[in-house]
Image (tube, helix red, strand yellow):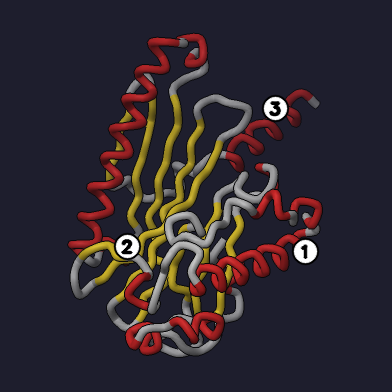
Amino acid sequence: MRTIAALSAVVAIALASPSHAADPKPDAVIKNRNIEARVFLDDKIKADAALAADCLTEGKKWLDKNAADAAASRKEDPQFFKDGGWDFERKYSIRSAVADRYVSLLRDDYMDTHGAHPNSDVNTILWDKSENKRISIRPFLTETADNGATMKAMVKAVIASLRSEKKKRDTSETATDEWFKGVEPNLLKIGAVTLAPSTEAGKSSGLTFHYPPYAFGPYAEGQYVAFVPWETLKPYLTVEGARIFGGARPKGDADEAQ
């Protein structure tokens, strides 16, 4: 029985942690007594030299910052490192490519600092291949003023999508205005955004907003993704916005986006 219990514990730990053995070789890594931290770029990113360089530069800065934080933490509280150093991982992956120009990326982080449980975070990048730089969704919208018509319509659609997702997960007890107050009609505060893929080639079916654990409920609820269909945005689209949006959200995208 003890052997079975021990094996069960090992399996549980393996499932809760990143699978180092199954992962490809990191594109950047720092490993010392304080921390092991890794950065991975998916193959599609590495096929674009400018995009890969941009992500790797950011990823290395992230490694350096966390390594410095780990060293400072060990110096201040060495007892928290008796079971080993911190474990961090960042993965960059492409979510969609639209109009052969706009590439949406997910940036997923895993952090284990020996707290009550590991933590995770998610952010996004929108890359313009024509300009080889990061951009926002502003070029697709006629106005994005704080508390303006566009942002208010977007917030309303985001919250409606989140309420629907909470109903599916049977977590409606946290589908309250108090939990949703962090979604503000402000481009920098509404959430990390990507262009959703579409059933129509070269188009986007709308916007998906990605939120980490704790954003709208306890950690156990995990990440949330809100979808805003392009039809909701139609009154506010620029000429470029009208050009890139169309079609419908593919079946299964809701699961793949999580």
Towards the viewer: 29 or 3: 29
Q: Nearer the viewer, mark 1 or mark 2?
A: 1
For the N terminus, the quadrant is top right
Q: Is residue 247 above or below residue 39?
A: below
Of tags 1 and 3, which is closer to the observer?
Answer: 1
Q: Quadrant of residue 130?
A: bottom left
Instruction: Please tell me how many numbered marks the rendered image carries.
Output: 3
Q: Which of the marked residues, 1 or 2, is nearer the chain's N terminus?
A: 2
Residue 58 vs 199, above or below: the answer is above
| Residue 8 coordinates in the image, percent (x, y) | 71, 34
Q: Is residue 177 left or right of residue 250?
A: right
Q: Mark 3 = which residue?
A: 6
User: Residue, x 38% and y 31% (percent of image)?
Assistant: 36
Q: Is residue 207 above or below residue 84?
A: below
Could you give the CA–CA distance between mark 1 and mark 2, rounded to whole angstroms? 36 Å
Give the labeled residue for mark 2: 43
Rendered residue at 38%/26% (across/down): 35
Mark 2 or mark 3, which has the lower sequence index?
Answer: 3
Mark 2 vs mark 3, foreground winner is 2
Amino acid at dot 2:
Asp
Residue carrying label 1: 167
Q: Residues within 10 Å of mark 1 (few under 14, many from 20)?
A: some
Density class for disc 3 (Cα within 10 Å; few <14, some 14-19, many ≥20) is few
The three-letter code of the residue at mark 3 reads: Ala
Q: Residue 192 versus residue 249: which sits nearer the camera?
A: 192
Gap between marks 2 and 3 measured at Cα: 37 Å
Mark 2 residue crowding within 10 angstroms, few (<14) / some (14–19) / many (20+): few
User: From mark 1 to mark 3, how far is it between C-alphas?
Assistant: 37 Å
- Tell me the kind of residue under disc 1: Lys
Image quarter (top left, top right, bottom left or bottom right) of the C terminus: bottom right
